[in-house]
Amino acid sequence: MRRSQYSIRCLSVLIVGAAITSSAWAQTPIERFSYYGPGAIIDPPQLGAKNRRVYLPSITFPIRVGPDAGEDGTPLHAYANSQVYRPFADSNEPRLYVYPWVDTLCESKHLGGPMHVCGERDADGSYKTIRAHQGIDIRPNLPKNRFYDVIAAEAGTVFKISNTTSLVSIRHSDGTGTACSYLHLMPIFVREGQVVKKGDVIGKVANVAPDGGTSIHLHFQCRGSGPDIPQNVVLPVYASLISAYRRAWGLSDAIQNGVLLRDPEREREGPLCGEPLSEQLAATKDLPLVGRYMHNCSEMGLIADRARFRIVYLRPKASLAAAAQRQPELVSGTTVTAGHFEGQAVNYNRACGDPKFPVKGTLDIAAASFTLEGQRTILDGACRPSGVSDEELIFAKLVPQAPPTDPLPSSTELTCPFALPPGQQPTILDGREIPPKSERSCNFTAITLPGNMNFEQMPRYVREWPGVRREMLTDAFQDQILTFQTAETGVGVWWYWLTHRAINGPNLETKGFGFNGKPTLAQVSRRSPARSAPRSMFGASILVRT
C-alpha cells in the first residue's frame, strides 16, 4: 500500500511539476523596490515638489517594466535618479542602476525652465516660480543603449517631435488638456499627427550625448493643471510614476482620494527628515487603532472612541523618542459636527511641564491625510510666554500593513512526509536522486530562487508563508529550492504562484491567460501560447502532452 501511494504521489508531482519553469522563480526583485518620497532631493539635500497628489492616476509606466516584461519572460526594472548628482564619473556606471528611487523634479543644478511647483509655498498658498529641472529622469533596466522600449503612458496624439533632443510630445485624449513629453529617444517610431494607444512603443531609451553630461535614460515630464496647480504648468509627476510602477509589478497603486499613501515597507524618509525611527513604544504597542499615519517624520496611531479621538506616537523619530516615551499622546479631542475636530496638542517642553495648546480641523478617517491647526505659545527659559507660533500638524495615512504572521517553524517541527532524517542521503538511481529534492522539500514543483539570495531578501509572500523553512536545497544550477514544513504548505504556495503569478499575470491585457482563461499545462509551462518552452527546474526542456 505504501508503494502504491508513493507511485500516485510521484505521478502527481510529474504532472504538476511539468508546469513549472525557470520563470517560476519567486518575483524577488520587486521586494527590493524602494523610493524616497516626493520632493526629497537627496544629494545635495534640497526640497523639491513635496506634493503627493497623483495627477495622472491611470497612466502606464513610460518604460516597459514588470516581472516578466522582457522578451524572454525575465523581469525588467527602471531606476529614477539624478543625472547630475552621482557618485561615479561614468554616467552609465552599472552601480547607478539601483533602488531606491529619487525625485529629480526641481533639481537646482539643471538649467531647466520656469517651475511653479518647487519648494515651499508662499503665505498665500502659491509657489514661487524658479528655474529648475522640469521632469523625472529614469534609467532603464541595464545600461544598454537603444534597447529598452519607451511606451505611451496614455492614449493621445503626437503633436511634436524634435530631433535635437530626441523628443516626442503626446497630448492625452482624455479631455484634460494634459500633454507629456518623452526625451532622449533614439530611434523614434512615431510621427507628428499620429494617434497612439496607451502602451504603444514610441521609441527606445537612448543616450543622446555619449560624450558626457547625460546617460542612457528617459526624461519624462507633463504639463497640465490640477487642484491648487495653475493652468498648464509642469506637473509634479513623481507620485504618479510611483503608482504606475507599483501597478506594473502587481502591487497596489497606493492611491487614496487622489493622493499617494505612504508605504512604510518601501518609502524612505529623505534627508530633510534625516532621522531613523525609534523602536515601537511599549505604551502604545497594543492599542486598538483605526489608522496609522506619518507626522513630523514619526509613525503615529489614531484611536477612536465614538466622537473622541486620540493621536499617539507609535515609532517616534530618534530625537523625539524620550519626549514621546514621557508623553506618548500628542493630540486628544472630540469631533463636533461633520467631522470638525477640536482638541489639544502637546507642546513638548519638559522643563515647563509639557503644556498643551488648542488645535482644530477636519478629521476624516477615510481621507488620505488631515491637518490640524492651532497657535502654540512660545515659552522662555523661565516658562513665561514670549510670543505665539502658528502650528500646522499634518498627518499622512500609511499604506495598511499586512497582519503579523506566526514565527517561522524550526527544522525540528518538520512533518514533510518525504523529508529524509538528518544525516541520511538519498538513493542514486541512474544518476537521479530518490526521492528527488522536489519531494524531500515538499516543494513539489521546485519553485526556486537565485543561489546568491539569503532568506531576508526573499519576496515577502515567500518568507512569511506559513510553514516555510529557512533551510534550502541546492539544485543542479546552484539555485535554491525552497523547503516547506508540510505537504499542505508546498501545495498551497504552488497554487498561489500558479493563480497569481503564472496565469493571471500582472497585466491581464498583455500577460497571462486572464481570469476566465483555460490554459493547458503546456501553455502554463510556457507562460503564454506564443513562447517556446524554457528549461525546467530539472534542467530538461519541458514537453507536456495534453
Image (cartoon, rainbow, N blue to C red):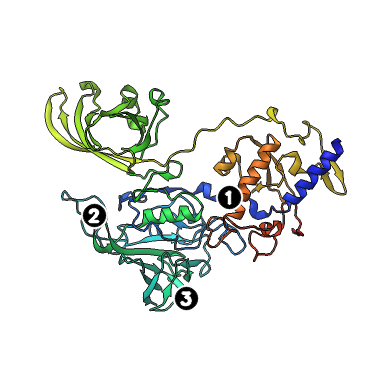
Of marks 2 and 1, the one in the foreground: 1
Of marks 1 and 3, the one in the foreground: 1
Of marks 3 and 2, the one in the foreground: 2
Residue at 40% x, 31% y: name it.
278
Q: Nearer the viewer, residue 155 or 535?
A: 155
Q: Which residue is mark 2?
A: 228
- State which quadrant residue 276 falls in: top left
Asked whether, in this view, residue 125 is left or right of residue 54, the answer is: left
Q: Which residue is mark 3?
A: 189
Residue 133: x %, y % from top left: 32, 61
| Location of residue 7 with respect to 375 vertically, above or below | below
Question: What's under tag 2, amino acid-wise?
Answer: Asp
Dot 2 lies on which element? Answer: loop
Dot 1 lies on which element? Answer: helix
Residue at 88% x, 49% y: name it.
430
- State which quadrant residue 368 falls in: top left
Between the C-alphas of marks 2 and 1, the distance is: 39 Å
Question: What's under tag 1, amino acid-wise?
Answer: His
For the N terminus, give its image quadrant.
Answer: top right
Q: Which residue is mark 1?
A: 500
| Location of residue 368 with respect to 354 vertically, above or below | below
Residue 67: x %, y % from top left: 56, 55
Residue 174: x %, y % from top left: 35, 66
| Lower sequence index among marks 3 and 2 | 3
